[in-house]
Amino acid sequence: AQSVTQLGSHVSVSEGALVLLRCNYSSSVPPYLFWYVQYPNQGLQLLLKYTSAATLVKGINGFEAEFKKSETSFHLTKPSAHMSDAAEYFCAVSDGGGGADGLTFGKGTHLIIQP
Amino acid sequence: GAVVSQHPSWVICKSGTSVKIECRSLDFQATTMFWYRQFPKQSLMLMATSNEGSKATYEQGVEKDKFLINHASLTLSTLTVTSAHPEDSSFYICSAAHTGNTEAFFGQGTRLTVV
């Protein structure tokens, strides 16, 4: 069974500072991994995905994530936080090891940007 | 990217009534659709997976007689919450994928409030 652990339910950073959101996964098959962002009362927007190609994945809005198999991690980073980055972030792993499968989500990390 | 539309965006219904939520893939054929539930300030939980023309597969603990899912065409899946009660109030999100996709595409979600 797949599982996702997001360390830190809340992360607070200053505007312009580095953003680091942690995600560790467990998967019985080679994983497909995703990061999504959710703004209040809205659906999910895909930030980036890992599908067994390059281990460093670049996404939208300046975010990127690195797949580290040895650490079973897929941490999300952004060099310089912007006020508009304040939102809920979810890491997810594909249940079946493919993109078109159900997802198991982490509990989410609420990112707070301090002015 | 592919577009998935959910309707309605929000709905309020009386306890004991049934509510239908639609999920449409607007520009691709969705062989598989997924339904998720999200409680306030919590993560998304996969409720069921539906393949066009087949019965839905429900996750453990999800009442199939309570949450009726129909995937009658390659562009439409519906979730009907039957005899709704206040504890069914939640944010319901669908996603859709075509075989071979590297990701599923999410709708904008439906906020259900049962009074």
Image: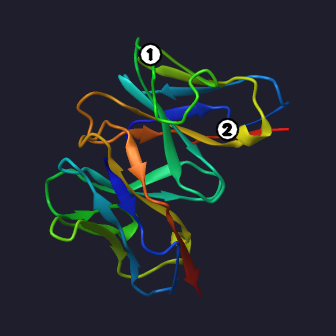
Identify the image quadrant of residue A71. Answer: bottom left
Circle 2 Cα neighbour tier, 10 Å, few/some/many (<14 / 14–19 / ≥20): some
Label 1 chain ID: B
The first of marks 1 and 2 along the sequence is 2
**In this view of the protein, which residue sits in the foreground, B110 or B46?**
B46
In the rendering, at what x and y percent does residue B39 appear? Answer: 63, 50
Locate residue B53 relative to residue A82 in the image: left or right: left
> Secondary structure under badge 1?
loop
- Please say if B33 is above or below A15: above
Q: Residue at x 30, y 60 (%)?
A: A25
Q: Residue at x 28, y 41 (%)?
A: A99
In the rendering, at what x and y percent does residue B22 appear? Answer: 59, 25
Nearest to the eye among marks 1 and 2: give it.
1
Label 2 chain ID: B
**In this view of the protein, which residue sits in the foreground, A69 or A88?**
A69
What number of labels is visible? 2
Give the amino acid at mark 1: Lys
**In this view of the protein, which residue sits in the foreground, A20 or B1?**
A20
Give the amino acid at mark 2: Ser
Name the residue beneath numbered marker 2: B9
Colour option used: rainbow
- Residue B12 in view here: yes
